Image: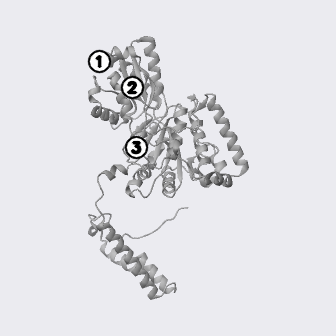
Amino acid sequence: AIMQVHTNRFQGHSPADPEHERGRKDEKKWARAEADPIKIFETFALDSKLLTENQLEEAKKKVNIQVKEAVDFATKSEVPPRSLAKELEYPDAPSTDYNLRTVPETFKAITEKIVDKESYERVTKHIESLRSIAKAGTITIGDAVNLAILEEMIRDPTTTIHAEDLQAGSSYNIPKLTQQTFGKLRAADEIIDEGHFIGKALGEGMNGFRPIVELMNTNFGIYGMAELSSAGNTYATTGGQFQMPMTIIGAGGTAPNQALGAEHSQPYHAYVMGIPGLKICTTASPSGAYGITKSLIRDNGPGILFLPVKMMKETKGSLDLDKCLPLNKATVLHTASESSVKENKAVTVLTYLHGVKEAQITIETLKSNNKDIDIDLIELTSLKPLDIETIRASLKRTHKLAILDESTLSGGVGATISAIISETCFYDLDAPIKRLCMDDAPVPYASSMEQAVVKRASDLTAAVIDLVNNKF
């Protein structure tokens, strides 16, 4: 439903607004006399005999008392301490163990009551099928997220979901069977307007629900930046009175030979890094996708999970079923050999999304051609907050760092991480940080041109060898 309201502004945009230049004094005078909604209501209430004059005066007295009490409370309150700013960053501490988070015992009965028997049986069979595939080690990233979402929506009837092409399972099966199981109110098949349905989720989050938004491709989230910013700020701007449990999930990033063009290859993960109050996660594995999704849904603040668009169906693996993963930890995928560390030929590599696959190619290349060189491979499963302790522990071994980054040279994720490490781990480094990031140019469609913009395994391999040989 769309409601269009024609109204009048009694004040300018700000106290500095030069209203006199627009001849608005007469307009304001007229509006206060003829268009003030409070005055209009008072006239209506008296004319329709909803209230007597005495009753109206009594009501106005009560309102004035409430306003005065509010003003007195504000003026007499102590100035909030500096520490409160950081305390209001997240409703839940980044170290929260979401495996310990329970739901009321009545929720199970509510789910059984609001989901019809046939739909419940169908989704239960689907869940069991996915769990079986997971145990066999052949579940995809998309199906792993679908399994996590279905399990959480059954567990918690306050959970909702919004997505384009939701009924058809979207592009990667992430919202598959949600609407068929939980109905159109809890599972909304949305129009192509990300700002619209992120905004709907924003309202749901403020009113006791746990909305999930599936973006299909995270680049489309650009059209919901204002709403996502509001979600990140809500807990702080309301003084902790409103939590904002919102989970946004989508495939994104920029893989080598992606061939999706500039509009579908933008580093949205870099764009949202500056939004306060937002937990930002990534994963390139089904197990990470499953465990992080469950944690984000249970978290009382807003979070976003980025998935690798070109690995959604090709990457398969097993799951640690019913297990939530932390939202503040990086994942060590490979540890350099002790001999390479001893010989000062080990390098710490930080990466995420498609960079994980590229880094694994580098490991195999080094094994074949440079056996004395090795890497600590750390997947940045938490971009914000950054797990600096895991990174520092690796740097104390290798003292060298390369960042394979799927964002741009200017304002990229790698730029932020490089700055933090330079400031906090400077004495653990014996070489400049090597940042392998996208060029600032738009990502071309043609693979021949794309090679000049998007870094890949060959670039990382060369960078690691250069760092070991002191070529900066």
Could you say where residue 284 lies in the image, as x and y percent from the top left?
50, 31
Residue type highlighted by circle 3 = Val
Foreground pick, 433 / 97: 97
| Residue furthest right as drawn | 118
Task: Say the numbered circle drawn on residue 349.
Answer: 2
Q: What is the CA distance from the residue labelled 1 to the residue labelled 2?
A: 17 Å
**What's the residue at 45%, 14% (across, down)?**
367
Q: Is residue 151 above or below residue 320?
A: below
* Left or right side of 98 for 128: right
Name the residue carrying label 3.
272
Foreground pick, 220 / 362: 362
Q: What is the CA distance from the residue labelled 3 to the residue labelled 2?
A: 23 Å
Quarter of the rendering occupied by the C terminus? top left
Residue type highlighted by circle 2 = Val
Q: Is residue 181 above or below residue 467?
A: below
* Left or right side of 190 for 448: left
Could you say where residue 146 lies in the image, as x and y percent from the top left?
59, 40
Residue type highlighted by circle 1 = Lys
Mark 2 is surrounded, within 10 Å at the Cα level, by few (under 14), some (14 to 19) or many (20 or more) other residues, namely many
**What's the residue at 44%, 48% (across, down)?**
92
Name the residue carrying label 1.
471
Q: Is residue 73 above or below residue 357?
A: below
Mark 3 is surrounded, within 10 Å at the Cα level, by few (under 14), some (14 to 19) or many (20 or more) other residues, namely some
Q: Is residue 1 above or below residue 464?
A: below
Q: What is the CA distance from the residue labelled 3 to the residue labelled 1?
A: 34 Å
Depth check, mark 1 against mark 2: the one in front is 2
Could you say where residue 426 lies in the image, as x and y percent from the top left?
27, 29
SS state under label 3 = helix
The image quadrant of residue 169 is top right
Foreground pick, 154 / 191: 154
